[in-house]
């Protein structure tokens, strides 16, 4: 008989079976971690923007809009633009 005195996979019932089980668990964890890493590394860097979402205006865009609307004069525009 081939299985007499041995554990399930032919290993002893002692520590050898536990070491093999631990290595198998670590191997599965390493494979899953590698797949997750590769998916994040080679995947898209940011999710695509939704059609209804508008990007926030920058400070320079707000300043240009205010100058174009006549809310501020040229001197104030140039001074604030220089500050930015």
Image (cartoon, grey):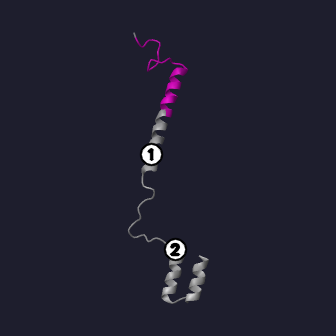
Residue name at image x 44 percent, y 11 percent? 4
Q: Nearer the viewer, residue 76 or 42?
A: 76
* Residue 76 shown in magenta: no
Residue name at image x 47 percent, y 15 percent? 6
Question: What residue is shown with label 1?
Answer: 38
Relative image position of residue 81 (x, y in whole percent): 57, 80
44 left or right, relative to 70: left
Relative image position of residue 45 (x, y in whole percent): 45, 56
Q: Secondary structure at mark 2?
A: loop
Which image quarter is the C terminus in? bottom right
Q: Is residue 27 above or below residue 19?
A: below
Q: Nearer the viewer, residue 26 or 67?
A: 67
**Mark 2 burial class by Cα count in 10 Å: few <14, some 14-19, many 20+:** few
Find the magenta span and give its range: 2-26
Q: Nearer the viewer, residue 63 or 39?
A: 63
Relative image position of residue 80 (x, y in whole percent): 59, 81
Residue name at image x 43 percent, y 59 percent? 47
Question: What residue is shown with label 2?
Answer: 58
- State how far apart marks 1 and 2 are (Cα): 34 Å
Q: Outermost residue, left direction?
A: 51
Relative image position of residue 74 (x, y in whole percent): 55, 88
Q: Is residue 19 above or below residue 83?
A: above
For the image, the number of numbered tags is 2
Q: Is residue 11 above or below residue 52?
A: above
Q: Secondary structure at mark 1?
A: helix
Q: Is residue 56 above or below residue 1?
A: below
Residue name at image x 44 percent, y 45 percent? 38
- Identify the disc placed on residue 25: none
First in sequence: mark 1 vs mark 2: 1
């Amino acid at each position: 008989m081939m299985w007499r005195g041995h554990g399930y996979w032919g290993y002893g019932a002692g520590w050898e079976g536990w070491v093999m089980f631990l290595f198998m668990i670590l191997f599965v964890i390493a494979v899953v971690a590698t797949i997750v890493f590769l998916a994040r590394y080679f995947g898209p860097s940011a999710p695509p923007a939704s059609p209804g979402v508008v990007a926030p205006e920058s400070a320079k865009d707000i300043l240009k809009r205010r100058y174009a609307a006549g809310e501020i004069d040229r001197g104030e525009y140039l001074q604030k633009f220089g500050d930015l």
